[in-house]
Amino acid sequence: MHELFLSSVIKEDEVPKILALIGGFTEMRERHQFTRVQHFEPSPAVKGLATIKDLQKERNISVPHWTELHQILVKQPCTIQLRTRITDSEMDTAKKGEAVTIPHDRHRLLRWTELPDPPSQRLPPYITQRKTVEIIDTRLEKILAENKFTRVSNIFDESYHWWQADYTEFALTRTWIAEDSLPADKVMNLAVQEPYAPYWMLNVRTLVESSPERMQQAQTQLEKVRDQFRDVLDFKVFDRRAMDTRILPVNGSVV
């Protein structure tokens, strides 16, 4: 799969205007949610996924994605995201200063993203395009532990979401830094936390099959969105190296 998206920085005092603007554009009410985002790194001593043969024996829809991720990690170790949705009732409890346990049977989303494609004549500089692998499972934390992955960061995303009929997603997001001292199954105490920065990121995102035709269609749709918001949103051009999830070896070279 490939992910293509536009990005814009939104100041805190601009959020009400953006909520109204995108709500009117998509003709839907925003969905407000919190997501715990954990980053994991593989052990330097392990190439790929040590349990790949066991995962391939399961014969479910995730097998091709596990196989693809294994092949990627054999070539180059990378940081991986583990995303867990936190319910509104859980977050309300956390905001009151109480730690909340995340159920073990809650679905998690594993996400790997490649270094974005370099600028080219075919791709406008304001559109980020990168290969991605996404896997949904309730056992992802267990699987990562079995494959010697170590948690290296623990953050929370607060976000608003809208969708169009063509599956284009609008996501307005800000980040909170979590308490690393908490057990892996606990939600942080938001009553004593502050957002990481006084701004939000607006991403207009689409996820498509990695075929030239589908990627061109997604690019055309994002260009249309940019034109429609030209007078109110400034979609930035970011340095692709800021989104590099590859882990550099000791000598500093990249495979």
Image: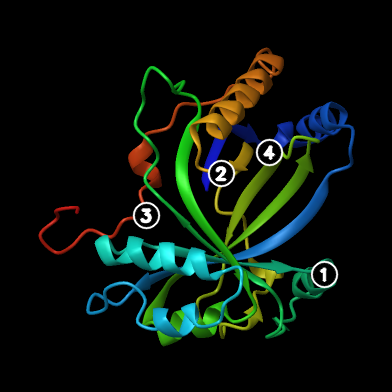
Q: Quadrant of residue 24?
A: top right
190 up-or-down from 168: above or below: below
The mark lying in front, picked from 2 and 3, is: 2
Q: CA distance from mark 2 to mark 1?
A: 37 Å
The mark lying in front, picked from 3 and 1, is: 3
The mark lying in front, picked from 4 and 3, is: 3
Q: Amino acid at mark 4?
A: Glu
Q: Amino acid at mark 3?
A: Thr
Residue sitting at 59 percent across and 42 percent down? 208
Left or right: 35 as drawn, with respect to 5: right
Residue sitting at 50 percent across and 76 percent down? 180
Q: Position of residue 218 (x, y in %)?
A: 60, 30
- Closer to the chain start, of discs 2 and 4, is 4
Instruction: Residue 247: tell me if it is visible.
Output: yes
The mark lying in front, picked from 2 and 4, is: 2
Left or right: 31 as drawn, with respect to 208: right
Residue marked by disc 3 = 245
Quadrant where the C terminus sits is: bottom left
Instruction: Residue 201: tell me if it is visible.
Output: no
Q: CA distance from mark 2 to mark 3?
A: 21 Å
Q: Position of residue 123 (x, y in %)?
A: 44, 23
Secondary element type, mark 1? helix
Q: Amino acid at mark 2?
A: Glu
Secondary element type, mark 2? loop
Q: Amino acid at mark 1?
A: Asp
Residue marked by disc 1 = 92
- Closer to the chain start, of discs 2 and 3, is 2
